[in-house]
Image (cartoon, helix red, strand yellow):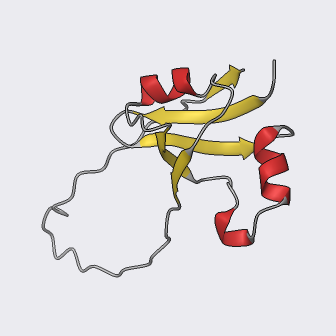
């Protein structure tokens, strides 16, 4: 295999990068500045123009790839609940991790 990618695929969101290992991504990062590096916890939201996670995971086998990466931003907010429902919907996956050998 060319490289190993540890990821979580979130349908409708993207591919969550959990770890950047030795290989093309690490080589790319060595020549990139901090803001343009591919980092842990980034989300690949498009790969070679594909936005469906299944299509992206197939497309990553191509010899050359173009990524659109979104970096999460951490924020802290204080909200007074006052006995009411929070009024938000949360989407998450517990204990889901995959490894792609490419």
Q: Nearer the viewer, residue 57 or 49?
A: 49
Q: Residue at x 53, y 61 (%)?
A: 71
Q: Residue at x 49, y 30 (%)?
A: 56
Where residue 92 appears, as percent x and y from the top left, is 40, 42
Q: Nearer the viewer, residue 23 or 66?
A: 66
Task: Tell me the quarter of the image containing the N terminus.
Answer: top right
Q: Is residue 3 visible?
A: yes
Where residue 34 appears, as percent x and y from the top left, is 73, 70
Q: Residue at x 21, y 74 (%)?
A: 81
Q: Is residue 39 left or right of residue 49?
A: right
On screen, residue 53 above or below 92: above
Q: Nearer the viewer, residue 78 or 15?
A: 15
Where residue 64 appears, as percent x and y from the top left, is 66, 33
Q: Nearer the viewer, residue 25 or 78?
A: 25
Where residue 102 appears, as percent x and y from the top left, is 72, 20
Q: Is residue 50 left or right of residue 27?
A: left
Q: Farthest residue in the left direction? A: 84
Quarter holding residue 36: bottom right
Q: Residue at x 50, y 37 (%)?
A: 48
Quarter holding residue 66: top right
On screen, residue 79 above or below 17: below
Q: Is residue 90 left or right of residue 27?
A: left
Q: Is residue 94 visible?
A: no
On screen, residue 43 above or below 83: above
Numbered-mark total:
0
């Amino acid at each position: 295999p060319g490289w190993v990618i540890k990821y979580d695929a979130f349908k409708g969101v993207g591919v969550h990068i959990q770890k950047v290992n030795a290989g093309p991504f690490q080589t790319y990062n060595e020549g990139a500045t901090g803001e343009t590096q591919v980092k842990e916890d980034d989300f690949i939201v498009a790969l070679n123009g594909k936005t469906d996670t299944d299509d992206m995971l197939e497309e990553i086998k191509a010899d050359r790839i173009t990524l659109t990466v979104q970096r999460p931003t951490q924020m802290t907010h204080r909200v007074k609940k006052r006995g009411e429902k929070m009024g938000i919907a949360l989407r998450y996956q517990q204990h889901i991790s995959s490894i792609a050998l490419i």
